[in-house]
């Protein structure tokens, strides 16, 4: 599903340049649930952003579902993000003046679907995350866990190939974190490939594989016995 | 350009961000409103000038007799000059091709009475051509005619206000009023766009007046209208020629400044209109300044709006919005807000101008109003600039990498 080779990324910081990713080689197969771990500054978020086509790499190759992601103009990249990738952010990134249903349906708007169809599909996905009743609530009327579940529904609504989650539980308490991770496990069990960036070990242990980043290189990549959440 | 889905999306964005929409709309409305009001008031000022100087025909030349200040041709100085009937005949003959109408006039004062009441109105003895020189419009009856002049009839034509004051509800036509000790039959009532003073006058045949004054052939002054084809410079030359002709005829020193006076209304009108034109230019500048202020205002607000929405735009990009989609969204929203509020300001300005219609008359502003074409043009200009003002920050926002936009707080 994901194949990256010798990926480099530097940030220009005035006169000096910060080398964040120093040759990453990494692949993810269909249906995997991968945790990308590392302390802050290890480059894990940068890696996820490049995988999510929100940022570009300096060198190396990236193939997503056998399609080479390189030198794309913003229009094409937007189209790929829309059809292939779903995002979940630490700060939810819901549009605050749109209600839950409208937020969930937004990716479908950019696919040119009529409003009626968008809302029908959006409502299906809200139902999947257990928030059908909250469809007409604004993000400000939802709790953190509910917001993240809306964000997950939004990430899933366009049936992406890969779901990318950047610290999805970073802003949540432990109980809510478990709820969100349970949802992620469930989606993974339905066959979706998911990458989760986290710095928390217990969250990483809920995945099936852990990739450990340190100072821009992969120091460890191991399959683990998944900590399956049952009690929610 | 028309995409229902996008309009729904924009409608939502405006509805949920009312303050932002109202703020930007307000700038545009205010810009157009002020522009139209300023322009309308300028127009009103110009109208006042026009009314002031343009109640009669504007191609009129007046000749008034004066008193000489220099001895000439055997006459002593301080001689009183008088015009007479032969002057009229000779001027008509001499300048026939250049003159439309010529009218002798004798102004005098007499007590006017009807039944037991007496009144005071200004009275003049004139010829039929007076009607055309003063642009009198008949409301009832007839004006003076050549037969009246020839027969020295004792008839009078009265102004609308004279008729109202003397006759109240009665029909004045055929009634007799006393002017001095003589009875005159009212044959006509006229109106004049020049206002109350012009409509408070009484006119009779000049020959009748001359007969009352023991058969004199003297006349007070001469008014004539020139053929408009001779143009402004032709008119100036004509008034100079008439002056020269009369000075020669009356044996007045050509350099004497006060033997007789010539007034060329066209020339005066031109000058006062130039002044009004300068006022209009000043008002136009202020108006354009207001418009520019409006444009700067909307530009600032668009920059602010796009800045404020950077994160939202980042989210939209992460979810698959292409740069052109982002630009179209911002521009369409900008067009919508500027159009609605521009039209709002335009209609408001026009209504406001109409509502003050006569209320500002004492401030020398008459019939303030603005050309609809101009109002629409100004509105369209502001809308276009609103679009340009929206496009620049929108383009910049569309080019920001989604990850940078998402980091914006």
Image (cartoon, coloured by chain):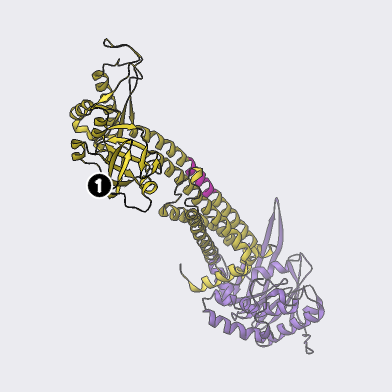
Chain colours: A purple, B yellow
Taking the view exactly as shown, the residue that stands out farthest to the front is: B116
Of B154 and A5, nearer the camera is B154
Of B111 and B274, nearer the camera is B111
Q: Is residue B287 above or below residue A141?
A: above
Which residue, given by chain and number where applicable, does mark 1 sit on? B142
Residue B359 can be seen, yes or no: yes
Secondary structure mostly seen in magenta is helix
Left or right, B347 with respect to A225, comes to: left
Quadrant holding the N terminus of chain A:
bottom right
Which residues fall within the magenta stretch? B282-292
Q: Which residue is depicted at the point 46% across and 56% down? A: B380
Which element type, helix, strand or loop, lies under badge 1?
Answer: loop
Q: Which residue is depicted at the point 65% across and 86% down? A: A127
Q: Position of residue B290 (x, y in %)?
A: 53, 48
- Residue B285 counted in the magenta span: yes
Residue B321: quadrant of the picture: bottom right
Residue B56 can be seen, yes or no: no
Q: Position of residue A62 (x, y in %)?
A: 61, 70
Taking the view exactly as shown, the residue that stands out farthest to the bottom is: A230
Q: Is residue A139 above or below residue A31?
A: above
Left or right, A223 with respect to B115, comes to: right
Q: Is residue B349 above or below residue A214?
A: above
Of A173 and B279, nearer the camera is B279
Taking the view exactly as shown, the residue that stands out farthest to the top is: B74
Q: Chain of mark 1?
A: B
């Amino acid at each position: 599903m994901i194949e990256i080779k010798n990926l480099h990324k530097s940030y220009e910081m005035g006169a000096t340049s910060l080398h964040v990713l120093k040759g990453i080689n990494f692949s993810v197969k269909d249906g995997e649930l991968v945790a990308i771990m590392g302390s802050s500054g290890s480059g894990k978020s940068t890696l996820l952003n490049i995988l999510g086509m929100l940022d570009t790499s300096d060198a190396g190759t990236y193939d997503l579902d056998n399609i080479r992601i390189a030198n794309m103009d913003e229009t094409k990249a937007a189209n790929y993000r829309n059809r292939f990738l779903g995002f979940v952010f630490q700060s939810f990134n819901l549009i605050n003046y749109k209600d839950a249903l409208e937020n969930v349906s937004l990716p479908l708007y950019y696919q040119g679907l009529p409003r009626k169809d968008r809302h029908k599909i959006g409502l299906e996905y809200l139902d999947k995350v257990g928030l059908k009743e909250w469809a007409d609530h604004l993000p400000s009327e939802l709790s953190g866990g509910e917001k993240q579940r809306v964000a997950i529904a939004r990430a899933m609504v366009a049936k992406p190939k890969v779901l990318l989650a950047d610290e999805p539980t970073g802003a949540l308490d432990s109980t809510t974190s478990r709820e969100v991770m349970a949802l992620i496990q469930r989606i993974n069990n339905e066959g979706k490939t998911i990458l989760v960036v986290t710095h928390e070990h217990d969250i990483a242990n809920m995945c099936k594989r852990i990739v450990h980043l340190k100072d821009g290189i992969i120091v460890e990549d191991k399959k683990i016995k998944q900590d399956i959440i049952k009690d929610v | 350009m028309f995409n229902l889905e996008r309009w729904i999306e924009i409608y939502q964005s405006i509805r949920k961000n009312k303050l932002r929409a109202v703020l930007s709309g307000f700038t545009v409305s205010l810009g157009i409103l002020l522009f139209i009001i300023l322009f309308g008031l300028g127009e009103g000022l110009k109208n006042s000038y026009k009314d002031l100087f343009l109640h009669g025909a504007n191609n009129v030349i007046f000749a008034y007799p004066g008193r000489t200040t220099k001895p000439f041709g055997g006459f002593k100085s301080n001689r009183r000059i008088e015009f007479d009937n032969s002057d009229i005949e000779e001027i008509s003959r001499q300048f026939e091709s250049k003159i439309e109408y010529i009218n002798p006039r004798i102004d005098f004062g007499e007590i006017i009475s009807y039944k037991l009441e007496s009144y005071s109105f200004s009275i003049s003895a004139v010829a039929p051509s007076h009607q055309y020189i003063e642009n009198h419009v008949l409301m009832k009856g007839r004006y003076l005619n050549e037969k009246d002049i020839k027969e020295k009839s004792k008839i009078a034509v009265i102004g609308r206000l004279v008729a109202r004051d003397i006759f109240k509800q009665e029909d004045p036509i055929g009634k007799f009023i006393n002017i001095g000790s003589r009875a005159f039959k009212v044959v006509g009532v006229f109106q004049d766009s020049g206002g109350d003073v012009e409509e408070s006058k009484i006119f009779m045949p000049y020959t009748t007046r001359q007969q009352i004054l023991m058969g004199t052939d003297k006349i007070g002054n001469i008014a004539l209208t020139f053929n408009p084809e001779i143009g402004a410079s032709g008119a100036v030359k004509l008034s100079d020629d008439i002056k020269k002709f009369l000075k020669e005829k009356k044996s007045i020193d050509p350099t004497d400044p006060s033997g007789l006076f010539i007034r060329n209304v066209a020339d005066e009108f031109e000058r006062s209109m130039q002044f009004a034109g300068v006022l209009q230019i000043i008002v136009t500048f202020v108006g354009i300044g207001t418009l520019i202020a409006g444009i700067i205002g909307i530009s600032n607000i668009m920059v602010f709006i796009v800045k404020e929405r950077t994160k939202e735009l980042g989210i939209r990009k992460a979810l698959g919005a292409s740069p052109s989609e982002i630009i179209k969204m911002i521009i369409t929203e900008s067009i919508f807000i500027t159009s609605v509020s521009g039209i709002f300001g335009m209609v408001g300005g026009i209504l406001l101008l109409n509502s003050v219609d006569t209320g500002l008359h004492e401030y020398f502003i008459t019939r303030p109003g603005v050309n609809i074409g101009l109002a629409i043009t100004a509105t369209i200009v502001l809308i276009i600039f609103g679009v340009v003002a929206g496009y620049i920050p929108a383009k910049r926002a569309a080019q920001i990498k989604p990850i940078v936009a998402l980091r914006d707080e």
